[in-house]
Amino acid sequence: MSDVRFCKNCLYSSDHPLGITFDEEGICSGCRIHEEKDSLDWNKRWNKLESILKPYRNKTKYDCIVPITGSQDSYFIMHIVKKKLKLNPLAVSFNKYFNTPLGIKNLANFRSTFNVDLIQQNVNPKITKEITKSTLRRFGSIYWPILAGQTSFPVQCAVRFKIPLIIWGAHQGMEQVGMFSHKHEVEMTRRYRKDHDLFGVEADQLPTIFDSLTKDDLWQFRYPDDSSLNKNSIRGIYLGNYVRWDPKAQHEEMIEKYNYLTSKFKRTFDCYDYVDCFNYMNLHDVLKLYKHGYSKVTDHACREIRFGRITRDEALDLVKKYELVEPDYIDLFCDWLGISEQSLNFIMDQHRNKNYWKKRDSRKWSFRGLSSKIKKDGKRNKVKNFEFKINSRLEYKQSSMYLTVGKGFP
Ligand SMILES: [Zn+2]
């Protein structure tokens, strides 16, 4: 742990799970690739996008598939696809079950605002719970089934309906750690999905003698095979390669234009991301802290440093303010999964990374995470433009439970 390095510009370290490199000035690959956002000719990039799309227009009933949720970049992607590019998309959505009333409302508003056909995949709750139990125990992840489903369902739809083009938002590996340049125009791959979204484990590797899962239970989580992808010439492109990606600015435009709803969270300052989920910014985020020594607030803070809206010292203060805050809605998760909070804590403790966590006695742990090793550089700004607009809340008094299916709420 003594040889961990930190970027001189943002807060990411050499321990970043997606992999990161540093140049001779001590700046990370993520920050360097981010600089392209201010040097690329985005009009030219847009024209490139138009030329890529041209052969797909009016070929089939739908020009493309757009994977969406009740939060994140869904509104912005559809705004670009439908309003700016004038494509006729099929929206597809994978039900993640941890839905908040706010997310359901955002999705309902999405459907009427953009007037698109939308199909939703609802894996039966029993299988979903079995897989969640299994991946929580093995990888300390409650999000594996969601990530596996969200990354395979759109591709399955592409094959099933013979719609060869899928349009995604930004590429996470490029945005966070600069895994590729925008100019590489990287596209969706089976490999990235497996290695980074799914911890190197495909659905078919899940069943073991300890589980009641069988291979037949897992088709919803399976990426189509190469022969069906090739036969239908399926490809998935990322809009972030062609449009200057700035999630904060984009969300604010979507609030203004389409009344996208946002909510305050306890564990981060960003009020726009993942408002459709009770767990992403709570239990899931705490598991990230246990395993990797940092949490989502660090991702948000690094992004905001790169856009120049806060300094590194201000970002570090935000991380320290939020990362150890107790998560909400743990009781809801335990009820849903049918386990006690005690069992959940026991499983979670098994996934604490000993580089960051020391057991003090039978129940207490002390944390020495990545943020505690970062030295301040003494630079502060008068923070400008750093307000996040809150216009709703995750739950409503009448219903603080997961909504499996909802047509809009209330
Ligand atoms: Zn950096």
Image (cartoon, rainbow, N blue to C red):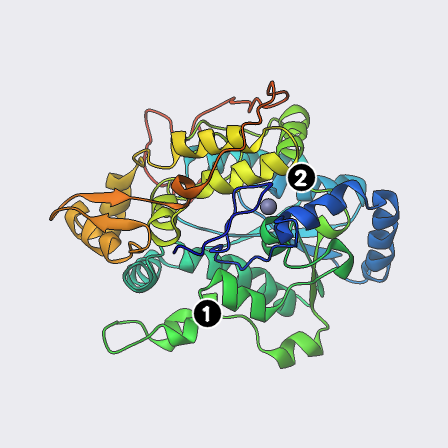
In the image, residue 70 above or below residue 33: above
Instruction: Report the number of discs.
Output: 2
In the image, residue 379 above or below residue 134: above
Q: Which residue is mark 1?
A: 200
**Can you see residue 409?**
no
Q: Which residue is mark 2?
A: 76
Q: Which quadrant of the figure has residue 352? A: bottom left
Q: Nearer the viewer, residue 177 or 225?
A: 177
**Can you see residue 112?**
yes
Q: Residue at x 52, y 42 (%)?
A: 11
Amino acid bearing label 1:
Gly
| Residue 224 appears left or right of 104 | right
Residue closest to the far left: 362
Assign the N terminus to one quadrant of the image.
bottom left
Q: Residue at x 55, y 33 (%)?
A: 312
| Residue 280 appears left or right of 240 | left
| Residue 379 appears left or right of 55 | left
Give coordinates of residue 274: x percent, y percent.
49, 40
Give coordinates of residue 332: x percent, y percent.
27, 40
Check disc 1 and report its element: helix, strand or loop.
loop
Residue 208 disc label: none
Nearer the observer: mark 1 or 2; the answer is 1
Q: Residue at x 27, y 61 (%)?
A: 137
Q: Nearer the viewer, residue 125 or 289?
A: 289
Mark 1 touches mark 2? (CB < 8 Å): no
Amino acid bearing label 2:
Phe
Q: Which quadrant of the figure has residue 366? A: top left
Give coordinates of residue 79: x percent, y percent.
71, 39
Residue closest to the far bottom: 227
In the image, residue 244 above or below residue 65: above
| Residue 182 appears left or right of 18 | right
